Image: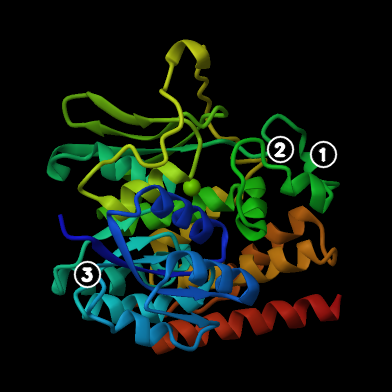
Amino acid sequence: MQKRKISIIGSTGSIGTQALEVIDKLRDKFEIIALAGGHNIELLKQQAEKFKPHYTCLGEEGLEKICSDKENDIILVACSGKIGLKPTLTAIKNGIDIALANKETLVMAGDIVMCEAKKYGVNIIPVDSEHCAIHQCIKNISQVDKLIITASGGPFLHKTVDDMKNATVEQALAHPRWNMGKKITVDSATLMNKGLEVIEAHHLFGFDYNDIEVVVHPQSIVHSAIEYKDGSVVAQLGLPSMHIPIQYAITYPERYEGIKSKSFSFADIARLDFEKPDFEKFPTVKLAYKMGKLGGTATVCMNAANEEAVFAFLDGKIKLYDIYSITKKMCNEHQIIKNPTIDEIFEVDKDIRKQVKNLLNSK
Ligand code: MG
């Protein structure tokens, strides 16, 4: 069998390094065209020595080159933030399949990205465990009535609102199930991450927001589910390891043993719990639904405001709950552009970030 030619954008990040662990187990299945790292030049060097990509690049420069390199069969977009958006669109225009781990791509420009993917016949395979689960469950999408996205609930699930209000950065970063980057871990503590995932699911699978449900499932074993018209529910289960969805996305539609370390056992897990999310304690999810339904640049505004506020929280400048109040304020004041161009999306993003910084400085 021919090797699959792959490039990784964000190879030195959390998803990127785990993707290379997967590829290390499947050396005969992949040829690496390019690795692009963010800041960690030492790690990128080590990766280059070990995996022998055709070339590497550091920072934003070079991403366009990688994404217009038709040698690639698939590109794993695993960088964080908005720098993933333009290169992803370039790859799509070049007919290269995308394994998508970058949230901003769909939250900021889901309409454009999905429309282009359809136009160029490109597959977008989600890496995020929830969307990856739904991707695995769906056989005939026209027969599906509802998407059910699971949420672990994060470190404050059974804590009080006061506990959350007084949360330290350390407490917010202590995620009970998943080991991830800092920004996404704070988003998981406020449940904004789930809100962003609802928006992504809407774009990826073309479902109305009213047909996407969030359920809290603390064990993170059921990664998400779908309900068919006839009432049948199909879920995807597995141990909470990002290796599994990463491997699925980059090897799709094939499946290999690869990274699998042990066999799944229901008896070992013993119980699976589910509960309704507490929207009073975690108002971010409702905000995300609201902005998603409004469409256009509403989600661009929410994403930018939230991210800047998360950075301010990580810097110790604001409290955990301020992330929500700042984001909500920006969303309420935002003049939505319907059907924005990519340039308009970036302008709104920049403008909102500036506004949040001004707001923080005036405090
Ligand atoms: Mg997720």
Q: Amino acid at mark 3?
A: Ala
Residue 42, percent across and down? Answer: 64, 73
Asked whether 139 or 244 is in front, the reply is 244
Numbered circle sitting on residue 163: 1
Image quarter (top left, top right, bottom left or bottom right) of the C terminus: bottom right
- Are the residues at dot 2 and dot 1 in contact (C-beta closer than 8 Å)? yes
Q: Amino acid at mark 1?
A: Asp
The residue that label 2 is drawn on is: 156
Q: Is residue 65 above or below residue 103?
A: below
Q: Earlier in the sequence, mark 2 or mark 1?
A: 2
Q: Tell me the distance, in whole angstroms, between the alpha carbons under discs 1 and 3.
A: 44 Å
In the rendered structure, the answer to whether residue 332 lies left or right of residue 250 reads right
The residue that label 3 is drawn on is: 117
Residue 138, percent across and down? Answer: 21, 40
- Are the residues at dot 1 and dot 3 in contact (C-beta closer than 8 Å)? no
Q: Residue at x 55, y 82 (%)?
A: 59
Asked whether 12 or 53 is in front, the reply is 53
